Each structure stands twice: as structure tokens, then as C-alpha cells.
Image (cartoon, rainbow, N blue to C red):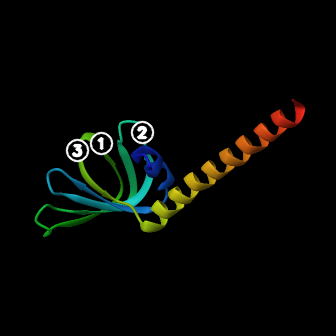
Amino acid sequence: MVLPLSLLRTAQNHPMLIELKNGETYNGHLQSCDSWMNIHLRDVIFTSKDGDKFFKMPEVYIRGSTVKYLRIPETVRSFRSLEISIDIALFLIFFVQYHRLRLSTS
């Protein structure tokens, strides 16, 4: 299982789409996020709720409680899953080596 904050932190400097509860969308590169999922985007294209207005902005700050939906590139999601798999594999290797050492010294 991938936790949302760890996935967001992995997505830093990658493009993403954010839809707010009021229907507005923001497309930009994730600069940072905090533990409340407040998001700082750069190189942003804002689209109005009706899709008839577009604005380009150098950066925006989005309050986490207003976010309805996040779309993160598949490459970031795959990379995060790979990181978790590697962490699990390293833990298992350590676990096996530790128990082999304990058995050989007993």
C-alpha cells in the first residue's frame, strides 16, 4: 500500500493535475507539499469550472482541504511501488542474514 503523502513527495518536480471541490483544475509541476496536503505548484495552467477560461501562472499554493482529485503520472506511481518493493527486499535480506548469524553463534 502506498500512502498519499509519500506518493506526493515522490512526485515532486513532476507534472500533475489537481481538481478542486469547486470544479477548477490546476495543471503544473509539484514543487512541494506538507503534512496537511497543502500543495505548491509551479508553471501552472488554471482552468475554470466551466472550462471556458484558462490562465497561465508562475506558481500557486493550494490548500489541501479544497482538493477533490489528484492525477499523478503513472511513472511516479510505478517508481514509488518499486521503492517500496526494494525496501521490503532489503529488510528481508537483513532479516535472513541476522538470523543466520544468530544461529551460527549459538
Amino acid at circle 3: Thr
Q: Earlier in the sequence, mark 2 or mark 1?
A: 2
Other-residue count near label 1 (Cα within 10 Å), few / some / many at <14 / 14–19 / ≥20: some
Residue designated by label 3: 66
Quick check: can you spot residue 55? yes
Pick whichever, 47 or 102, lies toward us: 102
- Above or below residue 104? Residue 56 is below
Other-residue count near label 3 (Cα within 10 Å), few / some / many at <14 / 14–19 / ≥20: few
Residue designated by label 1: 64
Tell me the quarter of the picture where residue 86 sits: bottom right
How far apart in space, not on screen, are marks 3 and 1 (Cα)?
Answer: 5 Å
What residue do we see at 19% from left, 57% from top?
24
Residue 34 badge: 2
Contact (Cβ within 8 Å) of mark 2 with mark 1: yes
Pick whichever, 99 or 5, lies toward us: 99
What residue do we see at 37% from left, 46% from top?
39
Residue that lies at the very extreme toward the left in this rendered image: 50
Q: Position of residue 64 (x, y in %)?
A: 30, 42
Other-residue count near label 2 (Cα within 10 Å), few / some / many at <14 / 14–19 / ≥20: few
Q: Position of residue 9 (x, y in %)?
A: 48, 48
Contact (Cβ within 8 Å) of mark 3 with mark 1: yes
Q: Earlier in the sequence, mark 2 or mark 3?
A: 2
What residue do we see at 45% from left, 51% from top?
7
Q: Position of residue 30 (x, y in %)?
A: 43, 55
Quadrant that contains the C terminus: top right
How far apart in space, not on screen, are marks 2 and 1 (Cα)?
Answer: 9 Å
Residue 7 badge: none
